[in-house]
């Protein structure tokens, strides 16, 4: 038993000695870094919708296996975001008009015409920017669809044209100015 214990101690000592003689040099491999470019184009906004003094804009982003599909899908998303954003602004305006005491904007006919006019915005917007970026074997498409406030005003005027009073009520709120 003592021989086994001594053998164990000798083997342990040899192992420690051999490992102590091993090289302590650390090797490093250079890390590959991606170029310092943003993940999206400079014109692209990460928010889906924006409005300024002259226009409304919707932004879309999509991933696909080819650049054409990525841009096409991003455009569909941007158009939907444009319609949603403009419709939300118009609805806020309608509520404000209603709260000021004008019951015309609460009628079912007005609401239907207003919603239909809002849906037409999607088709009237124009692609103002588009780009596709390849990353890790996929393409990411970015699109901005815009409509001027003057053109949006025309879309709503046309949509409410069956009842000129409806247009006068909405236009009085200066949403498109």
Image (spheres, helix red, strand yellow):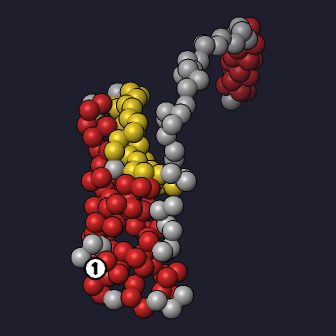
Please state, as top left, top right, bottom left or bottom right, where the N terminus lies in the image. Answer: top right
Q: Residue at x 30, y 87 (%)?
A: 108
Q: In this rendering, is residue 71 above or below 108?
A: above
**Where does label 1 land, which residue?**
163
Q: Residues within 10 Å of mark 1 (few under 14, many from 20)?
A: some
The answer to whether 129 is drawn above or below residue 109 in the figure is above
Q: Is residue 33 above or below residue 157?
A: above
Is 66 above or below relative to 147?
above
- Whether residue 81 is visible to the viewer of this picture, yes or no, is no
* Viewer-proximal residue among 161 and 47: 161
Residue drawn at x 24%, y 76% is: 162
In x, y percent, where is residue 166? 35, 79
Q: Residue at x 53, y 88 (%)?
A: 99
User: Residue 127's x, y, as percent?
Assistant: 35, 41
Q: Quadrant of residue 25?
A: top right
- In the picture, measured across the screen, residue 1 lies left or right of residue 82, that is right
In the rendered view, does 37 fall on the left or right side of 156? right
Q: What's the residue at 64%, 13% (across, down)?
A: 28
- The image shows residue 83 at horizontal and vertical percentages of 36, 60
Query: Is 28 in front, or is 7?
Result: 28
Residue 132 visible in the snapshot: yes
Name the image quarter holding residue 133.
Answer: top left
SS at mark 1 in the image: loop
Q: Position of residue 148 (x, y in %)?
A: 42, 51
* Number of numbered callouts drawn: 1
Residue placed most toward the observer, 131 or 163 = 163
């Amino acid at each position: 038993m003592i021989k086994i214990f001594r053998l164990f101690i000798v083997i342990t000592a040899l192992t420690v000695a051999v490992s102590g003689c091993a090289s302590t040099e650390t090797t490093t491999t250079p890390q590959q870094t991606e170029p310092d470019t943003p993940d999206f184009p400079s014109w692209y906004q990460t928010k889906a919708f924006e409005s300024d003094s002259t226009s409304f804009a919707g932004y879309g982003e999509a991933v696909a296996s080819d650049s054409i599909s990525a841009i096409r899908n991003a455009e569909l998303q941007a158009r939907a975001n444009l319609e949603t954003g403009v419709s939300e602004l118009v609805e806020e305006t309608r509520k404000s008009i209603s709260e000021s005491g004008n019951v015309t904007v609460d009628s079912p006919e007005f609401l239907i015409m207003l919603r239909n006019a809002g849906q037409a915005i999607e088709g009237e917007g124009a692609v103002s920017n588009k780009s596709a970026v390849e990353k890790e074997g996929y393409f990411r498409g970015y699109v901005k669809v815009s409509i001027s406030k003057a053109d949006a005003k025309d879309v709503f005027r046309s949509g409410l044209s069956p009842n000129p009073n409806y247009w006068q009520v909405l236009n009085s709120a200066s949403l498109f100015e």
